[in-house]
Image: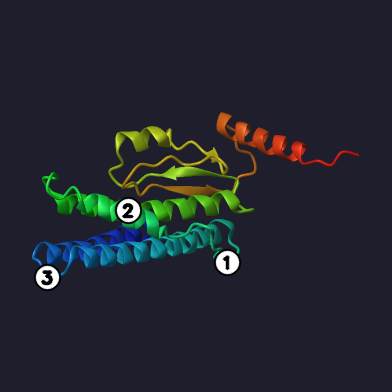
């Protein structure tokens, strides 16, 4: 299975478990407090698995591209338990006003899971010494926004952040070429770094 297949499967599995908890709460078999705790824990674990999956997949991608073994490097992206709990509470709070609360819960689960993976993958790409840039690897049936962001396969500098939207499984495909044209965003970022360096230079 591909990286995207595994990520989607993780989202599907976690969504199913979260919906089962919601149904138990809706039937009065467990309390709202317990449902929030269980849902938050499941989604947090899904985040952690998504991050590990992204880190492992990037290492495999770079190994294939460079024909050299590339170790898995942990990123500083971590599950945000506070944000997850807040998202669960907010979503459950709209149950009476949402026509299909189960569909909304599924979107929340997948959105949080996919974003964790994308953030970790993008961070790994930007920090890798082997990577010079990236192209957008479009998800099957990509929306018009993602196709526009793709720019017909344009290669972006690795420091340029890849835009995404909720539920998006597009990922930055690493490019190892030596020369990649900079963008206004990366030039601005470079200027900010240089300015910070000049500020902290000692006065002789």
Q: In this view, does 27 lie to the left or right of 118?
A: left
From the viewer's perspective, is residue 186 above or below residue 48? above
**Residue topped by disc 1:** 71
**C-alpha span from label 1 to label 3:** 46 Å
| Circle 2 residues within 10 Å: few <14, some 14–19, many ≥20 | few
Q: Nearer the viewer, residue 138 or 28?
A: 28
Decide if residue 1 is in sight here: no
Q: Is mark 3 on a helix, strand or loop?
A: loop
**Residue topped by disc 3:** 29
Q: Position of residue 36 (x, y in %)?
A: 25, 62
Labels 2 & 3 near each other (Cβ < 8 A): no
Among numbered discs 2 and 1, the one appearing first in the sequence: 1
Q: Position of residue 89 (x, y in %)?
A: 26, 54
Image point 23% across, 68% down: which residue? 34
Labels 2 & 1 near each other (Cβ < 8 A): no
Colour scheme employed for the rendering of this structure: rainbow
Image point 37% across, 44% down: which residue? 138
Residue 9 in which image quadrant: bottom left
Residue 109 in which image quadrant: bottom left
Q: Check the picture and name the quadrant holding the C terminus.
A: top right
Among numbered discs 2 and 3, the one appearing first in the sequence: 3
Q: What element carries label 1?
A: loop
Image point 43% across, 33% down: which residue? 151
From the viewer's perspective, is residue 64 above or below residue 183? below
Q: In this view, does 191 lie to the left or right of 37?
A: right
**Residue topped by disc 2:** 86
Q: Is mark 2 on a helix, strand or loop?
A: helix
Decide if residue 21 is in sight here: yes
């Amino acid at each position: 299975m591909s990286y995207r297949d595994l990520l989607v499967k993780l989202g599907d599995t976690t969504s199913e478990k979260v919906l089962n908890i919601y149904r138990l709460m809706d039937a009065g078999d467990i309390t709202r407090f317990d449902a929030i705790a269980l849902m938050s824990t499941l989604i947090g674990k899904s985040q952690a698995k998504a991050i590990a999956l992204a880190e492992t997949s990037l290492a495999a991608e770079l190994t294939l591209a460079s024909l050299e073994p590339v170790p898995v490097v942990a990123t500083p992206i971590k599950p945000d338990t506070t944000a997850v709990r807040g998202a669960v509470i907010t979503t459950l709070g709209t149950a009476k006003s949402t026509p299909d609360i189960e569909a909304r819960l599924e979107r929340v689960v997948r959105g949080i899971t996919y974003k964790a993976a994308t953030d970790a993958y993008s961070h790994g790409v930007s920090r890798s010494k082997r990577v010079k840039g990236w192209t957008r690897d479009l998800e099957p049936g990509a929306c018009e926004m993602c196709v526009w962001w793709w720019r017909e396969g344009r290669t972006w500098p690795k420091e340029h952040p890849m835009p995404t939207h909720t539920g998006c499984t597009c990922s930055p495909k690493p490019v190892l070429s030596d020369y990649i044209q900079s963008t206004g965003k990366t030039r601005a970022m470079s200027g900010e770094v240089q300015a910070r360096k000049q500020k902290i230079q000692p006065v002789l």
